[in-house]
Image (cartoon, rainbow, N blue to C red):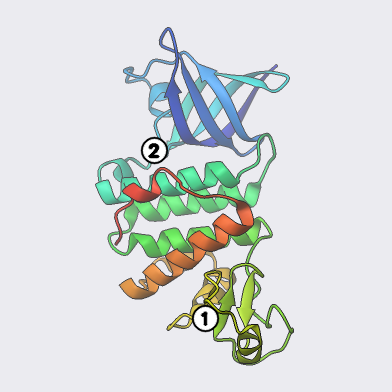
């Protein structure tokens, strides 16, 4: 069956006889792998649409759950990301993260639009790239139904001030529950950040990604949120040791 879909290139891998395997996050079919013989060195519109970060329209031949890309055209190439090392590394990290959280052969229009918004914003952003990456991850967790609980204490359900955060329990902790835990030695899955983590995470959750256009978190706050999210995502989604994370340049 011949079909088509809009999609975003997550990754490409060379195989034999000049063929490539493309990991495509498609609007119609979700995350799929597709083979293609479209030449890498070609200057054709089809070849340009197979480059990393490209958003394009793809003609597919589908046989059950096997796909081949017969043709493609660029809608937006996001070429400026590839011209800037910091942007390239930050975007590569987000693509790898998305690859890990997106389900095979399952449409996720919200995550698809979020990734497209991220690439559009990354292309024109000039500073604090990590703030945008963190905002993307929090919004992705929200779409996946895995966002932390921020309104009430995750253990007792009380409102009020919540100075702590439990990675294990997935949300904020009140002072009384922190005291009751009385953990010795200190539990590495419970933290008491020295910044307003609840306010920042709530802002990410309550606003569209595009509203982060001018948001720039201070370096220590970025580092604190990044550490917390790394632990949270590792514990709840079992996603650890992303290859591109070690290469991503902070800033």
Q: Residue at x 34, y 74 (%)?
A: 220
Q: Position of residue 244 (x, y in %)?
A: 39, 45
- Judge whether 5 appears above or below 236 on screen: above
Q: Position of residue 246 (x, y in %)?
A: 35, 49
Q: Quadrant of the C terminus?
A: bottom left
- Judge whether 1 appears above or below 222 on screen: above
- The quarter of the picture where residue 106 lies is top right
Disc number lying in front (1 or 2): 1
Residue 94 appears left or right of 30? left
Q: Position of residue 45 (x, y in %)?
A: 40, 24
- Judge whether 111 appears above or below 182 on screen: above
Residue 118 appears left or right of 103? left
SS for dot 2: loop
Residue at the farthest left position:
84
Crowdedness near tag 2: few (<14), some (14–19) or many (≥20) residues, C-alpha within 10 Å: many
**Mark 1 or 2 closer to N-term?**
2
Q: Position of residue 54 (x, y in %)?
A: 43, 37
SS for dot 1: helix
Residue that mark 2 sits on: 77
Query: In terms of depth relative to the viewer, which is nearer, 97 or 111?
Result: 97
Residue that mark 1 sits on: 199
């Amino acid at each position: 069956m011949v079909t088509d879909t809009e999609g975003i290139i997550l990754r490409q891998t060379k195989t034999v006889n000049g063929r490539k395997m493309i990991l495509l996050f498609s609007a119609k079919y979700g995350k799929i792998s597709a083979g293609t013989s479209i030449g890498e060195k070609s200057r054709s519109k089809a070849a340009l649409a197979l480059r990393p970060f490209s958003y394009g329209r793809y003609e597919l031949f589908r046989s059950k759950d096997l796909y081949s890309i017969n043709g493609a055209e660029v809608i937006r190439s996001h070429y400026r990301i590839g011209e800037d090392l910091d942007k390239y590394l930050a975007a590569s990290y987000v693509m790898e993260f998305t690859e890990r959280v997106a389900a095979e052969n399952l449409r996720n229009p919200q995550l698809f639009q979020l990734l497209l918004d991220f690439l559009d914003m990354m292309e024109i952003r000039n500073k604090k790239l990590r703030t945008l990456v963190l905002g993307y991850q929090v919004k992705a967790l929200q779409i996946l139904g895995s966002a932390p609980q921020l309104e009430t204490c995750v253990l007792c359900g009380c409102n009020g001030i919540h100075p702590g955060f439990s990675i294990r329990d997935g949300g904020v902790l009140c002072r009384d529950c922190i005291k009751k835990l009385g953990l010795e030695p200190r539990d590495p899955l419970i933290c008491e950040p020295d910044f307003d983590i609840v306010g920042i995470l709530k802002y990410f959750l309550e606003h569209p990604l595009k509203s982060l256009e001018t948001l720039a978190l201070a370096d220590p706050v970025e580092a604190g949120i990044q550490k917390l999210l790394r632990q949270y995502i590792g514990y709840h989604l079992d996603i650890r040791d992303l290859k591109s994370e070690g290469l991503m340049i902070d800033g």
